[in-house]
């Protein structure tokens, strides 16, 4: 800055102070006007009882437990389905499995017409990233993340590929990135297991996600982290008898457990440690207070990989597990954390499910959600404003493996559960979840009015889909 000698020095200082003040106020204004970030962390096949804050005694999850201690536990939160792909489709589109395009596992891809929650965030001028297991669109299709609203992607597209924790490649946006693992057996999709294990996929996914936060810390962002942990490598189980792939057993190394159980516990604790690192990074950049974090699982615990869910009491008091529409297959441990916005140590048993992310995200960023969705915002519950919480009459599921099943959670408080297995002619089971969370006593004979309501909803909520024709038609 050139100084005019005719201008008094005091005036020059005053001008400079005014410029600095204006610049500081502009920066502060931009920071205040920035909308909140959302980080949605999705574990894979984590049971309702697999976390310390949900009753787990053997597996250590101190960082996730701390989220619950400083945030809210949602104790009647449901996955979109009881297996991977349809659960993720419900999460991304806000449509339950009677309306969603993808209703089961298989090689099906989201279409250009499917509107995702990532696309909603893009409408609100967010930067979006997905790191982990996608499962809703394979290479060369319109279903890949970068064609469904995500600016960045790193991880697995194909579900079978995601079983392999030591793959020969991962996907960076739309390009294969070669890794240093050598396969003992590998399919065209990348499924299999490795004979030489160098690059552990979960660690690579986490590091890429952390770097993405570094690059976008000054922007409003939506970060979707669908981790593969603790899903088993089913192909490795068939080849090596151990599908719980992890670099080391960590604090469980000297436990007198089977290697499969050590691996299961070590995977969960490893994920917990990485979640702690992510939280620390948010605090380092002073953006934790502007970031809502939601942690949950895509469905219940599993029998796969050689681990023993009974040993860990992985689903706690719930009946059933993955591939069941009993509570153990769809009720998932869920935590919401947002410093100074969500009351520390709070709990809600209000019934919500994955499809509610769409309406919640829309309210979070201040835009209207799509009209034809099966979704309500749960922000009022997170902010401890139950009187402002939209109520619903039911949540619906249908599932097409194991000869098929349909289920409902009924009532504003989610008290009643209706379930029908295998055929439209099968009897409907009714359970009182408030008094029988383990679904031990079928009370259908005592409540014909609930049976009739369930019968009607089972008919109306299933919309025909060319990919899934039976057993409900």
Image (cartoon, rainbow, N blue to C red):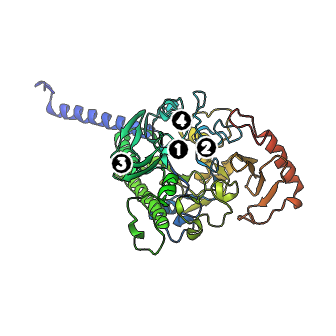
The answer for how far apart the CA atoms under marks 4 and 1 are is 10 Å
Specify few, some or many for label 3: CA neighbours under 10 Å numbering under 14, 14-19, or 20 or more. some
Specify the label residue 181 is tagged with.
Answer: 3
Please say if 444 is above or below 188. below
Of the numbered discs 2 and 3, the one sitting upstream in the chain is 2
Q: Is residue 53 or residue 350 the one in the foreground?
A: 53
Specify the label residue 159 is tagged with.
Answer: 1
The answer for how far apart the CA atoms under marks 2 and 4 are is 12 Å
Helix or strand or loop: what does disc 2 sit on? loop
Q: In the rendering, at what x and y percent does residue 180 appear?
A: 33, 46
Specify few, some or many for label 2: CA neighbours under 10 Å numbering under 14, 14-19, or 20 or more. some
Location of mark 2 (residue): 105
The answer for how far apart the CA atoms under marks 2 and 1 are is 8 Å
- Quadrant of the rendered image containing residue 178: top left
Can residue 93 be seen here? The reply is: yes
Of the numbered discs 4 and 1, the one sitting upstream in the chain is 4
Q: In the rendering, at what x and y percent does residue 60 appear?
A: 46, 67
Task: Please tell me which residue is depicted at 27% across the width and 32% down the height of the picture.
Answer: 19
Helix or strand or loop: what does disc 3 sit on? loop
Helix or strand or loop: what does disc 1 sit on? helix
Location of mark 4 (residue): 137
Please say if 102 is above or below 303. above
Whether the residues at callouts 4 and 1 have beta carbons within 8 Å, the answer is: no
Question: In which quadrant will I find the C terminus?
Answer: top right
Whether the residues at callouts 2 and 1 have beta carbons within 8 Å, the answer is: yes
Specify few, some or many for label 1: CA neighbours under 10 Å numbering under 14, 14-19, or 20 or more. many
Of the numbered discs 2 and 1, the one sitting upstream in the chain is 2
Q: Residue furthest bottom?
A: 256
Left or right, residue 42 beside residue 90: left
Left or right, residue 338 beside residue 77: left
The answer for how far apart the CA atoms under marks 3 and 4 are is 24 Å
Whether the residues at callouts 3 and 1 have beta carbons within 8 Å, the answer is: no
């Amino acid at each position: 800055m050139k100084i005019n000698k005719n201008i008094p020095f005091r005036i020059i200082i005053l001008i400079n102070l005014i410029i600095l003040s204006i610049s500081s106020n502009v920066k502060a204004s931009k920071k205040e006007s920035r909308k909140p970030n959302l980080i949605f962390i999705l574990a894979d096949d984590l049971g309702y009882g697999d976390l310390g804050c949900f009753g787990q005694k053997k597996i250590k999850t101190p960082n996730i437990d701390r989220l619950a201690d400083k945030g809210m536990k949602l104790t009647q939160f449901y996955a979109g389905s009881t297996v991977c792909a349809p659960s993720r489709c419900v999460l991304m589109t806000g449509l339950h499995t009677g309306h969603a395009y993808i209703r089961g596992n298989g090689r099906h891809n989201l279409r250009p017409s499917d509107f995702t929650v990532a696309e909603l965030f893009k409408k609100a001028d967010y930067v979006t990233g997905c790191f982990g297991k996608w499962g809703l669109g394979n290479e060369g299709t319109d279903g890949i993340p970068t064609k469904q609203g995500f600016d960045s992607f790193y991880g697995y597209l194909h579900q079978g590929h995601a079983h392999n924790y030591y793959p020969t490649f991962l996907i960076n946006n739309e390009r294969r990135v070669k890794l240093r693992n050598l396969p003992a057996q590998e399919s065209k999709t990348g499924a299999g297991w490795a004979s030489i294990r160098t690059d552990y996929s979960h660690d690579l996914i986490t590091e890429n996600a952390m770097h993405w936060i570094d690059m976008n810390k000054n922007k409003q962002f939506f970060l979707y982290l669908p981790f593969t942990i603790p899903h088993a490598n089913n192909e490795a189980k068939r080849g090596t008898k151990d599908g719980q792939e992890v670099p080391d057993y960590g604090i469980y190394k000297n436990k007198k457990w089977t290697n499969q159980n050590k691996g299961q516990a070590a995977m969960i604790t490893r994920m917990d440690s990485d979640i702690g690192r992510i939280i620390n990074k948010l605090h380092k950049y002073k953006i934790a207070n502007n970031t809502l974090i939601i942690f949950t699982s895509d469905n219940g615990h599993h029998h796969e990989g050689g681990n023993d869910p009974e040993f860990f009491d992985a689903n706690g008091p719930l009946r059933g597990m993955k591939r069941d529409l009993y509570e153990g297959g769809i009720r998932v441990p869920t935590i919401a954390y947002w410093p100074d916005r969500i009351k520390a140590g709070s709990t809600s048993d209000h019934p919500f499910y994955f499809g509610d992310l769409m309406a919640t995200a829309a309210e979070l960023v201040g835009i209207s959600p799509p009209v034809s969705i099966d979704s309500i915002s749960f922000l009022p519950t997170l902010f401890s404003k139950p009187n402002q919480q939209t109520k619903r009459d039911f949540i619906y599921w249908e599932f097409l493996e194991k000869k098929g099943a349909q289920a409902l959670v009924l009532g504003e408080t989610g008290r009643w559960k209706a379930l029908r297995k295998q055929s439209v002619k099968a009897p409907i089971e009714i359970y009182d979840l408030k008094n029988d969370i383990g679904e031990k006593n079928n009370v259908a004979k005592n409540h014909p009015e609930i049976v009739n309501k369930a019968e009607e909803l089972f008919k109306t909520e299933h919309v025909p889909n060319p990919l899934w024709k039976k057993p409900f038609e």
